[in-house]
Image (spheres, rainbow, N blue to C red):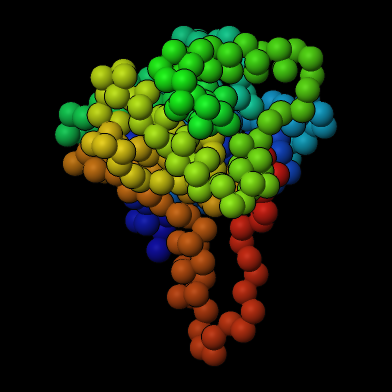
Amino acid sequence: MTDEAATRHFRTLFISDIHLGAKAAQADMLIDFLRFHDAEKIYLVGDIVDGWRLKRSWNWPQSHNDVVQKLLRKARKGATVIYVPGNHDEFLRDFTGRHFGGVEVKLNDVHVTADGRRFLVMHGDEFDVVVRNARVIAYLGDWAYDAAIAINLVFNKIRRRLGFPYWSFSSWAKLKVKNAVNFIGAFESALAEEAHKMGCDGVICGHIHHAQLAEYSNIAYVNTGDWVESCTAVAERHDGSFELIRWSEVVRARARAKSAQPRIVSEQPIVRPTEAA
Ligand SMILES: [Mn+2]
């Protein structure tokens, strides 16, 4: 079977949290994924390059180059590629509206699906402070919520300027294992609320490394997941419906199907533990 025969064509692909420059980035898995998936429009939903990690120690293997090349090639072949920066690549937020090799940088965007629904596309780190203080903010109400988002912006900028290590949502949430589900829930509902405020039907984000297709009181919540732990992406089909692709599971199933009997006794885990969010 050739690549072309096996390639799936979508209307839109949403990918986030690749963390190029971080050792844990699953660049080879992503290259493999990009080989078998094409789209008219590709959204890079933040934390594509891990600027914070690169600043601490330079790590840029060939495979990370290949990811960039592969994405640029798709742009060259006619795909619209939009890069919405996250907190790890927030240096790109200063280049909003600029184009790099056919890739346009946008602070956030509204994507209209084939069936006419409007989706707010943003990374999601804007809501870190809201999530961390979810209970207090819920108690204080709307103004505290808006203030928290404003504080978060300033807080991140100062932290970056002072050279503090980055704050990782997923490792922080995992430290608080018992409440991790609550934190993820708080993040999801905060993002859905923002989409509602913006007059959208849903939100598409990343940041928390937790892929999801869900709904919060009629607002669709879509999280693209990541390419550090789970190797996930979200695709919009030509009818406007969404599909969550768990690539490591597809690869595993493919390998299983290929291997003849007797069955493999021990299987190498494909997904490595995380370092960043
Ligand atoms: Mn992030």
The residue nearer to you, when weighing 244 against 202, is 202
Q: Using the image, determine if residue 248 lies above or below residue 134.
A: below
| Residue occupying the point 47% across, 20% down | 140
The residue nearer to you, when weighing 81 against 174, is 174
Q: Quarter of the image containing the C terminus?
A: top right
Q: Using the image, determine if residue 264 lies above or below residue 195.
A: below
Left or right, 173 with respect to 75, comes to right
Q: Is any atom of residue 14 visible in this view?
A: no
Residue 260 point in image, percent of width and height: 51, 84
Residue 65 point in image, percent of width and height: 65, 35
Left or right, 227 with respect to 190, comes to right
| Residue occupying the point 50% across, 75% down | 256
As drawn, the residue found furthest toward the right would be: 57
| Residue occupying the point 58% across, 9% down | 94
Residue 154 point in image, percent of width and height: 62, 11
| Residue occupying the point 77% across, 28% down | 165
Q: Is any atom of residue 158 visible in this view?
A: yes
As drawn, the residue found furthest toward the front would be: 139
Q: How many marks?
A: 0
Left or right, 66 with respect to 197, comes to right
Q: Quadrant of residue 50?
A: top right
Residue 77 point in image, percent of width and height: 40, 31
Q: Quadrant of residue 141?
A: top left
Q: Quarter of the image containing the N terminus?
A: bottom left
The residue nearer to you, when weighing 76 against 173, is 173
